[in-house]
Image (tube, grey):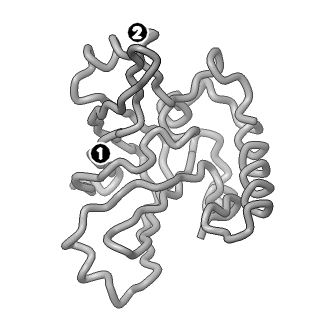
Amino acid sequence: MFRIRNNNSDNLERERICEKSYRQHLNKFSKSSNTDLWKYFCLDFFHDGYIEKITLEQDLKTVSFRLDCPNIKRYANDDYEFVSASFECIFTGVSNFNVYYENPQMAAELSKYASQFLFSEINTSPVLETMGKEDCYSILIQLLAGDDVVWMELVFNQVHVIADEPLSFARMESDPAFKIPTYSDKKNGSVD
């Protein structure tokens, strides 16, 4: 389902080439607008995090989901441990929201499982080309629910990512004992 990435390939060379193409695709975009999109989704910050709930608001233009990030490392004594932090992601100005099931017969069964965030792909939706707007973005998210893969795609104007405990997370970001896998121009430069 990914349009550029191929992280489910048995061919590691093919997967590496696709990932390089995806990184080149990301480098085409300015990271100064919609900074939370780039900070939290460019390097798959939420990889393996569990989604608590997904909500489509009454205005039908806002989609939010709560999830945790289990990828924060805390270093101590030449070793590290993983630390989790929870977040809410709020997508506003949503003009397209789709959910695809790789196994549609299992769709009713999926409510029994927590969805796990696997990977995402930014700005690859063909809908963006038809809109002709520079302030629209897309995200395609691969989820795992039980043993089944589910794809969620949004086209939107803005995303805000809010930590459940903003002060604690800000302290982690400023403390060199923590490695937080987010993207920033200063820290990462290009996405290569």
Q: Quadrant of residue 86?
A: top left
Whether 83 is drawn above or below 170: the answer is below
Residue 76 position within the rendered picture, expressed as x and y whole percent measured from the top left: 38, 15
Task: Please state the horizontal and vertical placement of residue 26, each as a whole percent of the image.
Answer: 70, 41
In the picture, which quadrant includes the C terminus? Answer: top right
Q: Nearer the viewer, residue 188 or 12?
A: 12
Tag 2 secondary structure: loop
Which residue sits at x=73%, y=61%? 12
Q: Is residue 112 left or right of residue 80?
A: left
Separation of disc 1 and disc 2 at Cα?
A: 23 Å
Assess whether mark 2 and mark 1 are in contact (beta carbons under 8 angstroms).
no
Task: Identify the residue at image location x=59%, y=70%.
Answer: 1
Identity of the residue drawn at 57% across and 46% down: 137
Badge 1 marks a residue whose secondary structure is strand
- Along the viewing direction, whichever of 162 and 191 lies nearer the viewer: 191
Residue beneath disc 1: 67
